[in-house]
Amino acid sequence: MAETSLYMRMLPPMSRWILQGGADALSAAARAWPAGLSSEACRARGQGELHALWLGPEEFLLLAPPDHEPRALREALAGMPHSLVDVSHRQVAFEVCGPDCALLLSAACPLDLDAAHFPVGMCTRTVFGKADIVLWRTRADAFHVEVWRSFLPYCTELLAEQVQN
């Protein structure tokens, strides 16, 4: 799908993993993943094209360029109880951007997206309408939205409906 509007654009394909583990596994993962892992709740960390989004006390969404193989991460976690699941084909991402991006998303998202309450770098699981999403504020005027591929048409049509209103 190409650029769809002035307020929304599809993001390029990415590799994605869900990492879960206890304190020892996450400590090892933080050293092996170049972006590191945030110790602060609901915060994303990035280095270049590698990112780690905090989803829960023992869970992160890792993002990387397509076909990236997290070899160093797998080696660091070898022998430790953990889960590292490739979800690259399950999810897609789009960006909602522009001066009214928070207002557009707020029409179907229950969170307070004002920059004072949802600053740049914050990320969380939430809903958009009835679809589960991961929402990450990447700039003052932009949000990265991760959604299951099957819910993409629903989310983009709901967003387009908000623009028309």
Image (cartoon, helix red, strand yellow):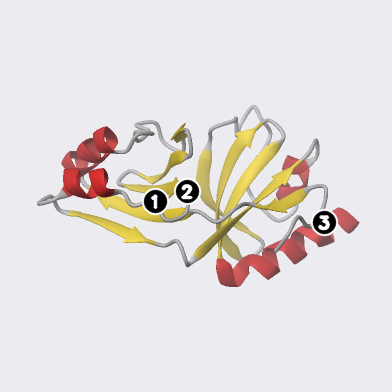
Mark 2 to mark 3 CA distance (whole Å):
31 Å
- In this view, the residue farthest toward the right is 164
The mark lying in front, picked from 3 and 1, is: 1
Q: Circle 2 sits in a helix, a strand or a loop, which is it?
A: loop
Instruction: Sort mark 1 into few (<14), some (14-19) or many (20+) by Cα contacts within 10 Å.
Output: few
In the picture, which quadrant includes the C terminus? Answer: bottom right
The circle drawn on residue 65 is 2
For image coordinates 15% across by 53% down, the residue present is 81
Kindly tell me whether residue 165 is visible in this rendering. Answer: no
From the viewer's perspective, is 147 left or right of 32?
Answer: right
Q: Pointers 1 and 2 in contact (CB under 8 A)?
A: yes
Residue 164 found in image quarter: bottom right
| Image coordinates for residue 155, horizontal then vertical, percent | 68, 63
Say what amino acid the circle numbered 1 marks: His
The circle drawn on residue 159 is none
The mark lying in front, picked from 2 and 3, is: 2
Q: Circle 1 sits in a helix, a strand or a loop, which is it?
A: loop
The circle drawn on residue 68 is 1
In the picture, which quadrant includes the N terminus? Answer: bottom right
Give the residue number, with chain letter if any, for mark 3: 162
Check the image and report above or below for 26 versus 110.
Answer: above
Check the image and report above or below for 98 versus 84.
Answer: above
Q: Nearer the viewer, residue 38 or 14?
A: 14
Q: Nearer the viewer, residue 3 or 26?
A: 3
